[in-house]
Image: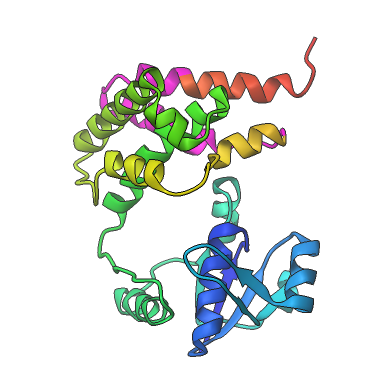
Amino acid sequence: MRIAVIGCGAVGSLFAAHLAKAGEVEVWAYDVWGEHIGAIHNNGLRISGAADFTAHLNATADPKSLPRCDFGIVATKAIHTKAAIAQVTNTPYSKVEQLAGFITRSGMNTIPLQDARGAQWAKLIFNASTNPVGALTLLHHRAATRFPPTGQLFNDLIAEGEAVAAKLGIKLHGDPRQLVEKGANAPGKHRASMLQDVLAKRRTEVDFMNGAIAQSGEKVGIPTPLNKALWQLIKGLEYSWQDPE
């Protein structure tokens, strides 16, 4: 049984390393970052934090060298997801349950869902509230949560997202506010991925976060002025990197 992990950044590395360490399946990691793939080849893939270990697995930066795999875990940035899953459709739920079993036995408890939209929207609303605020203020997550003006902004952004999800008939799987608090109580000074992108002057995922909520809101008649404003501000920041006249 083979599992391919497409995108071996922070999230993809967690899945790849845990699955490889468990030894139940053959793991292949694919990433375009050649230096990272080379390090995995030479030294293995090290995970630190809640778990601390080094796993050895197959890794490649050449998609043509990937063998046929039974499962694929896509952990790319949102801007690359569509291309990464273009050839994957109509997955039977039994396969979802099987993959969830592999991941749970590797040490990461996993809940398979018949309808993933509730979980997707809960995570979307959480990310759309925290990421752009961190990117624009340069505050790490705990500081932005505890500072009253930005903490209130988190709540107001979440309320807009919840209203859109409710209008779409989506029942959230989890509470975005609890995710905010969980992140704020975590050790260390966590910088949102969008803040890291901004500091590196990389394209952000704002189109797939606040942009997605704003566009969905327009379609169903729910106003989302805060999400729309943050979307526009981040897009303006990206535009500034081009040094426009």
- Note whether residue 97 is visible: yes
Residue at (51%, 30%) from the top-left corner?
134
Question: Nearest the camera: 177 or 2?
Answer: 177
Q: Image quadrant of residue 156?
A: top left
Residue at (52%, 62%) from the top-left corner?
49
* Whole-percent x, y for residue 211 in the image: 46, 30
* Whole-percent x, y for residue 209 in the image: 45, 36
- Note whether residue 62 is visible: no
Question: Nearest the camera: 187 or 106?
Answer: 187
Q: Is residue 211 above or below residue 39?
A: above
Q: Image quadrant of residue 91?
A: bottom left
User: Residue 134 in magenta?
Assistant: no
State the residue lying farthest toward the top.
245
Q: Image quadrant of residue 137?
A: top right
Q: Is residue 172 above or below residue 109?
A: above
State the residue lying farthest toward the front.
187
Taking the image as shown, residue 42 lies to the left or right of residue 53, namely right
Q: Is residue 120 above or below residue 242?
A: below
User: Which color scheme did the rendering employ for the protein?
Assistant: rainbow
* Whole-percent x, y for residue 194 in the image: 57, 37
- Quadrant assignment for the C terminus: top right
Q: Main secondary structure of the magenta part?
A: helix
Residue at (22%, 44%) from the top-left corner?
170
User: Residue 207 in magenta?
Assistant: yes
Residue at (55%, 40%) from the top-left corner?
191
* Whole-percent x, y for residue 176 in the image: 30, 41
The magenta span reads 201-229
Q: How many marks?
A: 0
Taking the image as shown, residue 59 lies to the left or right of residue 124, namely right
